[in-house]
Amino acid sequence: MPRLIGAAQTVSSGSQTETTTTFNSSGTFNAQPATTAVTFLVIAGGGGGGSDGSTAGRYGGGGGGAGGYRNSTPGESSGGGASAESTLAVTGGSSYPVVVGAGGAGGQYDSDELTDGLQGNNSSVSSITSIGGGGGGGAFADGQAGGSGGGGQWQGSGGTGGYAGTSNQGYPGGAATHQARQGGGGGASEAGFPGASPPNAAYGGDGLASSITGSPVTRGGGGGGQSGTTTRAGGSGGGGQGGPSPAAGTANTGGGGGASGNNLGNDGGAGGSGIVVIKEPAASFEIASSCWDLRTVFRLVKAGDWTN
């Protein structure tokens, strides 16, 4: 039998380019072989806007809050006034489930608790989770806290403040200040505006821009509340307008839904779905093998180190 003296192995090298993967719906992230950490943008689904009540003396709703906004792109920001987070550690060649949260349904024009907008759904990858936006308050039901909070509402005898956002993800909604002045939903970069705060009464809070995909895109705007029969803008970054024609938040921005105006008989707008973006850096790698190639065997035989 042949006998090997010494040791040898084959080493192959390679490289991987910078790669950005965008998830507009849930799926699986497959890390490249040399990836050890990734930059991420994780935005949850926005909350639905609240609605008017079908019983006299019950009034329109608050705007839906934007979905929670978490970002690790250097030099940019996360929601709620936070700095960019650290990169996410991963294992090269491994797979990770990605969840993209749907937006919450808008409140229904009704005579019971269905008038509030529903909270959006969480988005996540590995250990990073962004919280769904809070639903806007309705004529018969409170709104919710969330990634960014839903706008406050007036329930016949008094108003509520805006609902809270999640620390390092988003801002609170605006307060209701009058029976026809409900608050806008909170956004990633600012709180929703109160129902009476000219010239921006009941506007949704603005979102944040990120260039993780190459060009700056603004996402995470809160939904507009209602100010009488006047259309109130949603926040930049996908927030739906509130008022006579409430609009849904824009898909894959986490924008909050717009609220129904007073005495107009409309449902609130649904929140926009979230998004997950993952960027892998360029890297080089080497793979060692214990297989012997023919040139190595020839050199060993010639040197007398491959013998019977």
Image (cartoon, grey):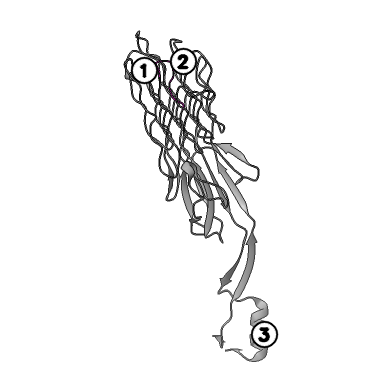
Residue 227 on the magenta segment:
no
Q: Locate residue 117, reporting x and y percent.
A: 40, 24
- Nearest the viewer among 132 and 33 is 132
For the point 35% across and 10% down, which residue is it? 57
| Few, some or many residues within 10 Å of mark 2 (<14, 14–19, 20+) | many
Q: Main secondary structure of the magenta part?
A: loop
* Residue with the most extreme top position: 56
- Horizontal side, residue 185 vs residue 116: left or right: right
* Residue with the most extreme bottom position: 304
For the point 45% across and 22% down, which residue is it? 195
Image quadrant assignment for residue 153? top left
Disc 2 marks a residue whose amino acid type is Gly
Q: Locate residue 84, reporting x and y percent.
A: 51, 50
| Few, some or many residues within 10 Å of mark 1 (<14, 14–19, 20+) | many
Disc 1 marks a residue whose amino acid type is Ala
Q: Which residues are magenta?
A: 178-184
Residue 181 on the magenta segment:
yes
Structural distance between the alpha carbons of marks 2 and 3:
85 Å
Helix, strand or loop for disc 2? loop
- Residue position for label 1: 139
Q: Locate residue 197, reporting x and y percent.
A: 48, 24
Q: Earlier in the sequence, mark 2 or mark 3?
A: 2
- Residue position for label 2: 261
Q: Locate residue 45, reporting x and y percent.
A: 46, 34
Q: Are marks 2 and 1 in contact (CB under 8 Å)?
A: no
Q: Is residue 8 above or below residue 289?
A: below
Helix, strand or loop for disc 1? loop
- Residue position for label 3: 299
Q: Quadrant of the C terminus?
A: bottom right
